[in-house]
Image: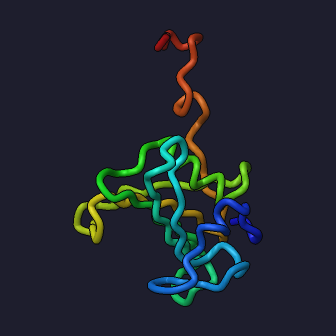
Amino acid sequence: MRRILPPLLENGRLTTGYMCSPSGSGPYGAFQMQRPYEFNKCIRIIACGAELEGAQGWEHVSVSLEHRCPTWDEMAYVKRLFWLDEETVIQIHPPEKDYVNYHPYCLHLWRNIRQEFIMPPRFMLVPSAEMGNDYS
């Protein structure tokens, strides 16, 4: 996770209220900013670090919108704000018995700093024309 946040994100830091944090205090706290390409709409972000008691090495960012779930592009945008390009960040679909839903339009990004995430083989991530998968 980035230790110094981009100015765009830092400018959206909430310094009062729930999950507030002082300016310049690193990648943890609550943030509110305009969504990319929709300047009158707001994206809300809460970030917690792996150092948090009980986090067990997990960095976590939640992303929510008022009237719908974030899109892939919006989640990728937030990923780039908080993490470096070479860091793997995941969304998790736990067993249904472990589902928790406090907000109907909130998605989460996770990264464990204790161990590198094992990626599936590349051909499973990006089907290639050589395999007979032409999606054009």
Q: Residue pushed farthest left?
A: 97
Asked if residue 132 lies left or right of residue 85, the reply is: left
Query: Can you give x and y, in whole percent of width and height, for residue 25 in the image?
Result: 70, 81
Q: In the current view of this chain or complex, which residue is farthest to the bottom?
A: 53
Q: Is residue 118 left or right of residue 5?
A: left
From what the image shows, is residue 82 above or below residue 75? below
Q: Against 16, is 124 above or below?
A: above
Q: Nearer the viewer, residue 81 or 114?
A: 81
**Residue beneath the point at 49% across and 83% down:** 19
- Quadrant of the snapshot with the N terminus: bottom right
Name which quarter of the figure residue 81 lies in: bottom right
Q: Nearer the viewer, residue 46 or 14?
A: 14
Q: Position of residue 56 (x, y in %)?
A: 55, 80
The reply, left or right, for residue 116 in relation to residue 124 is right
Snapshot colouring: rainbow
Total marks in image: 0
The extreme right residue here reads: 4
- Is residue 100 visible in this depiction of the protein? no
Residue at 24% from the left image edge and 61% from the top image edge: 96
**Residue under the point 65% across and 85% down:** 22
The answer to whether residue 21 shows anywhere in this view is yes
Q: Position of residue 100 (x, y in %)?
A: 28, 70
Residue at horizontal 33%, vertical 59%? 66
In the image shown, does 51 or 4 lie closer to the viewer? 4
